[in-house]
C-alpha cells in the first residue's frame, strides 16, 4: 500500500521529535519516499542530519536558503506529496494552519498542498485542552484535515495527562488508512446519497418526549465517508450532540413524520438511501399543549404507530439502492433477514445491541451485512468510520453490477 508513495513530514519543536525519527525509519522500511521539513524550533531538539540520514533525502529547513533543486521548493514538495504528516505538531503550527498563517517553510508548504494532511499533536496537557487549541483542531477537522489523538501518560514536563505524541506504529496505521480512503475517494462521484442519522423524538407534552439512545455517530460517519468518496450527500438528522459535518447539506428533524417528509423531499433525485437513524415506531396519540401535571394516579399514554419509513421507501425504490439497519437485542439474524425481504432492501446492516462495542453511542460497531440474495458477511469490531467504508464498498459493488 505504501510502497513508492511520497510522504512529506513536517517536524515542529517538541521533545517528541525523537519519536519522529522512529516514524521515518518505519516508513523507509516500507519503501516510502520521505521528505522532511523541520522548523527552527525542531532543530533545537534534533539536528537535520539525523533526519537526512534516515530519510536519505536533503532536509528542508529554511525558506531562503539556496534551493537544492531549480523549482520553488515549498511548491514542489506541496505538489509531490501523496500525504503530508506533521509530527509532532505543536499548538503553534496547529494555530498557524487553522488561521491561514504561512510564515516559514513548513506552514507555506502545508498551505500550498492539495494532499491530505495528517496532524499528530504533542504538547503539555493544559495546552492541548486549552479551548483555543481545541477550537483550532475542530476547525481543521471540519476542513478535512486528519488528526491522530495524542496518547495519555507522563509528559516531559512531569505532568500526567493527554499530550504525548501517538506511537509511531499507530501513526503508520493511520497513514495507511488515510491513503486507502483517498485512493478510492471518488467512487461515488455523481451519486446523490441520503443518509438518516440519530434518534427521533416524539413529544408527549412541551417538556417530555419518547426517544432512544442513538447518538447519530453511525449515520454521521456514513455521511462523511460518502462525501469523501465524491457523493452529494443529504444528511437527515434527528437531534444529536454532534457537530454538523462541513460541506454536507443537513436537514434537522425531530419526529418520525418529519423524517419521512424530509426524505420524500429528496427521494426522487437520490440514487442511494441509507437509513442508519433509530426511528421511533410509536408516537403519543395526543400531544398535550401544557406540561402534564402529576396526580395520585397512574398515567396511561396511548401510542399511535408511526409510518415504517423504510418499508414505504421499499415500495417505491425502483432501481435506487436502499440500505437499512437492524438494531436488535435478540434473535438478530432472523429479525434482520425478515427486514431485508419485507422492506425490499438491497442489504441490511445488523448490529447486535447485546454485544459490547456495538450499536448505540459507541465509537465502534460490530456488524453483519445480509443482502437480498441471502449472502451473509460478518465483520469484527471496528470504528464506525471503518464500518461506513465497508457499507459504501458494498454499495459501490452493487453500482458496478448494474
Ligand atoms: O447513532 P449511533 O449511536 O451511532 O447508533 C447507531 C445505531 C445503533 C442507531 C444504528 O447502527 C442502527 O442500528 N440504526 C437503526 C436502528 C433501528 O431503528 O433499527 P430497527 O431495527 O428498529 O429498524 C430497522 C430499519 O428500519 C432501520 O433502518 C430504521 O431506520 C428503519 N425504520 C424503523 C422504524 C420506522 N418507523 N421507520 C424506519 O424507517
Image (cartoon, grey):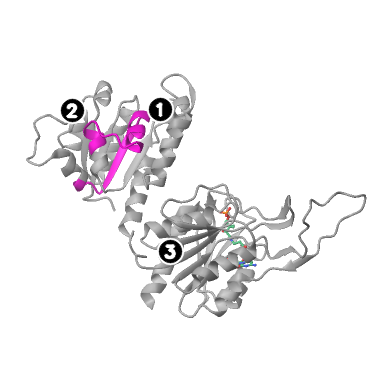
Q: Could you say where residue 220 lies in the image, as x and y percent from the top left?
A: 50, 54
Give me the C-alpha separation between circle 2 and circle 1: 24 Å
Residue lying at the far front of the rendered structure? 289
Answer yes or no: do the residues labelled 2 and 3 have beta carbons within 8 Å? no
Sequence order check: which comes first, mark 2 or mark 1? Answer: 2
- Residue at (64%, 70%) from the top-left corner? 335
In the picture of the structure, the residue carrying the numbered disc 1 is 123
Give me the C-alpha separation between circle 2 and circle 3: 44 Å
Secondary element at image label 1:
loop
Q: Could you say where residue 5 lies in the image, as x and y percent from the top left?
A: 23, 49
Q: Is residue 260 left or right of residue 188?
A: right
User: In the displayed structure, would residue 305 be above or below residue 133?
Assistant: below
- Residue at (34%, 64%) from the top-left corner? 187
Asked whether residue 212 is in view, the answer is yes
Q: Which mark is residue 49?
A: 2
Return the residue nearer the eye: 136 or 178.
Answer: 136
On whether ligand 1 comes within 8 Å of the CB at mark 3, the answer is no
| Magenta range | 79-108
Asked whether residue 324 is in view, the answer is no
Mark 3 Cα shell of 10 Å, populated few (<14), some (14-19), many (≥20): some
Would you identify the image quadrant in which residue 20 lies?
top left
Q: Is residue 77 left or right of residue 182?
A: left
Secondary element at image label 2:
helix
Quick check: is 105 in the magenta stretch? yes
Sequence order check: which comes first, mark 1 or mark 3? Answer: 1
Q: Is residue 259 left or right of residue 385?
A: right
In the picture of the structure, the residue carrying the numbered disc 3 is 392
Amino acid at each position: 500500500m505504501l510502497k513508492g508513495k511520497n510522504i512529506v513530514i513536517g517536524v515542529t519543536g517538541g521533545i517528541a521529535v525523537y519519536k519522529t525519527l522512529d516514524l521515518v525509519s518505519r516508513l523507509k522500511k516500507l519503501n516510502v519516499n520521505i521528505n522532511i521539513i523541520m522548523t527552527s524550533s525542531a532543530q533545537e531538539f534534533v539536528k537535520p542530519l539525523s533526519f537526512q540520514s534516515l530519510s536519505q533525502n536533503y532536509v528542508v529547513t529554511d525558506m531562503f536558503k539556496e534551493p537544492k533543486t531549480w523549482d520553488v521548493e515549498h511548491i514542489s514538495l506541496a505538489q509531490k506529496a501523496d500525504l503530508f504528516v506533521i509530527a509532532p505538531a505543536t499548538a503553534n503550527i496547529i494555530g498557524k494552519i487553522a488561521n491561514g498563517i504561512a510564515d516559514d517553510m513548513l506552514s507555506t508548504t502545508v498551505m500550498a498542498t492539495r494532499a491530505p494532511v495528517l496532524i499528530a499533536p504533542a504538547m503539555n496537557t493544559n495546552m492541548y485542552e486549552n479551548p483555543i487549541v481545541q477550537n483550532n483542531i475542530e476547525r481543521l477537522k471540519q476542513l478535512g484535515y486528519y488528526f491522530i489523538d495524542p496518547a495519555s501518560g507522563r509528559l516531559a514536563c512531569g505532568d500526567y495527562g493527554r499530550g504525548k505524541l501517538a506511537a509511531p506504529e499507530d501513526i503508520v496505521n493511520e497513514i495507511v488508512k488515510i491513503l486507502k480512503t483517498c485512493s478510492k475517494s471518488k467512487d461515488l462521484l455523481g451519486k446523490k446519497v441520503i443518509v438518516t442519522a440519530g434518534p427521533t423524538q416524539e413529544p408527549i407534552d412541551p417538556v417530555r418526549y419518547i426517544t432512544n439512545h442513538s447518538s447519530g455517530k453511525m449515520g454521521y460517519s456514513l455521511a462523511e465517508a460518502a462525501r469523501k468518496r465524491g457523493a452529494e450527500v443529504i444528511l437527515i438528522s434527528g437531534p444529536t450532540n454532534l457537530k454538523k459535518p462541513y460541506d454536507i447539506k443537513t436537514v434537522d428533524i425531530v419526529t418520525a413524520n418529519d423524517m419521512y417528509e424530509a426524505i420524500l423531499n429528496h427521494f426522487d433525485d437520490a440514487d442511494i438511501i441509507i437509513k442508519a437513524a433509530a426511528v421511533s415506531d410509536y408516537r403519543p396519540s395526543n400531544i398535550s399543549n401544557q406540561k402534564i401535571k402529576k396526580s395520585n394516579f397512574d398515567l396511561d399514554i396511548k401510542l399511535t404507530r408511526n409510518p415504517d419509513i423504510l418499508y414505504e421507501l421499499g415500495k417505491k425504490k425502483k432501481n435506487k439502492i436502499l440500505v437499512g439497519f437492524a438494531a436488535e437485542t435478540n434473535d438478530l439474524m432472523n429479525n434482520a433477514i425478515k427486514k431485508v425481504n419485507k422492506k425490499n432492501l438491497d442489504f441490511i446492516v445488523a448490529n447486535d445491541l447485546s454485544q459490547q462495542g456495538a450499536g448505540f453511542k459507541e465509537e465502534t460497531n460490530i456488524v453483519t451485512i445480509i443482502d437480498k440474495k441471502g449472502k451473509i458477511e460478518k465483520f469484527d469490531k471496528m470504528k464506525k468510520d471503518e464500518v461506513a467504508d465497508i457499507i459504501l464498498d458494498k454499495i459501490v459493488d452493487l453500482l458496478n453490477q448494474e
